[in-house]
Image (cartoon, coloured by chain):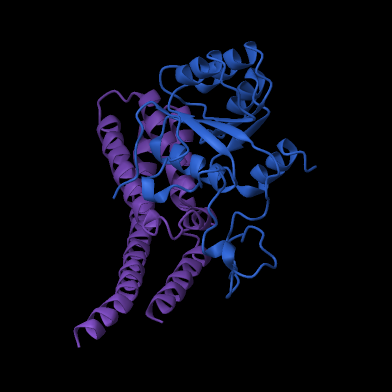
Chain colours: A blue, B purple
Amino acid sequence: MTLSRESHTSTSNSILPQSANLLTENGKFKKSMASALPSGDQGAAEANSGNGGQMQKKPFTFNEIVLRNRLTALVVDGDNFCRLLEQGILQAYGLETQSVNNGDAAVELIASGAKFDLILIDMLLPILDGVEATRRIRAMGMRCKMLGVTACSGERERQAFLAAGVDMFVEKPLGPEILIPVLRELDGQV
Amino acid sequence: MVGTTLSQQLNNYIQTMHEQGILDYHFDHVKALQNEENPRFVMEVISMFAHDAEAGIAHLTTVLNSAVVDFAKVISFVHQLKGSSSSIGGVRMALACREIRHACDNLDKERCLQLFEGMKQEYNTLKECLNIIFEMERSIVVANETRRRQPQMLETNRHQQ
């Protein structure tokens, strides 16, 4: 059994093999065994790399936020691995997701009328880069939350991406400390 | 139960990798995506990461050993390796990729080659760690499958008597 690698556009919530669909028929996230553990302090378990760490660390779960509304997201990333993980994480938090692997496909999707509450977009993309794709998406009047999630880390790149229209510039990977406040805001929980 | 013991061993190993700085907490997020319906998810992610990383390293080897280095290509491959390694929690490998990117910005081939060797070492360390996790995950899957089959085998034996 292997992870599927959609070559262009994934419009299904099943980004993983059929048996690994994280969503029920109603689009709700299927709770994992880890999340069935007794509740308590179930926030993200921050690793303490290099400083001794805790001996009995609670397992990380995606239960820190429970969405009240239906939220949709588009993941735009040219790297299959990162795209699959980002989409999986968003689904685990309860979002309905689509993904594309280049900037041109993202622009086309928006131009076709697709609407999203959240767009995660990488900077270095094939065919049309993330900066130009963002510019064109904003020029079409799309006002949704856009996070530039990229392996790039320079200040010049950050300024260019923000100037193009992303709301936040995030160095990969996108962690819960950034994503959860964004989801709370989108879900009206703030 | 055998499966529980193996899970505890796995969690302890992951914690040790955290403490050694080889993996950061992003690996925990990947692991949390695994559930009863996709018990092999972590194994598949590790396989995918290793496959893509080795392809990226092979491309970088070719480009960096060219007479005239195409730094735009180097940046592109390094960008991919940095993104995937950081996403799986391989923080040291991701940092090594960042250093190569800086050397590319300075168009410094020698420095790139030097840092590339360092990055490959970090990848090998990470790969060794992930391979151990892979094998432990596989053992857990096998143990759980065996445990699920056992009640059925007992029932079959009872009917045959």
Task: Give coordinates of residue B157: x percent, y percent.
Answer: 22, 83
B106 is higher (above) or lower (below) than B145 = above
Measuring 50% from the left and 44% from the top, which residue is drawn there? A25
Q: Quadrant of residue A46?
A: bottom right
From the viewer's perspective, is residue B135 above or below residue B99?
below
Quarter location, residue A15? top left
Q: Quadrant of residue A181?
A: top right
Q: How many marks?
A: 0
Q: Is residue B52 visible?
A: yes
Q: Nearer the viewer, residue A118 or B38?
A: B38
Which image quadrant: the N terminus of chain B? bottom left
Which residue is farthest bottom? B161
Residue at the image point whose x is 34% and y is 23% from the top: B70
Residue A183 location in percent, x, y? 68, 41
Residue at figure coordinates x 32%, y 69% from the top left:
B145
Image location of residue B113, percent across then percent down = 34, 39
Outermost residue toward the right?
A190
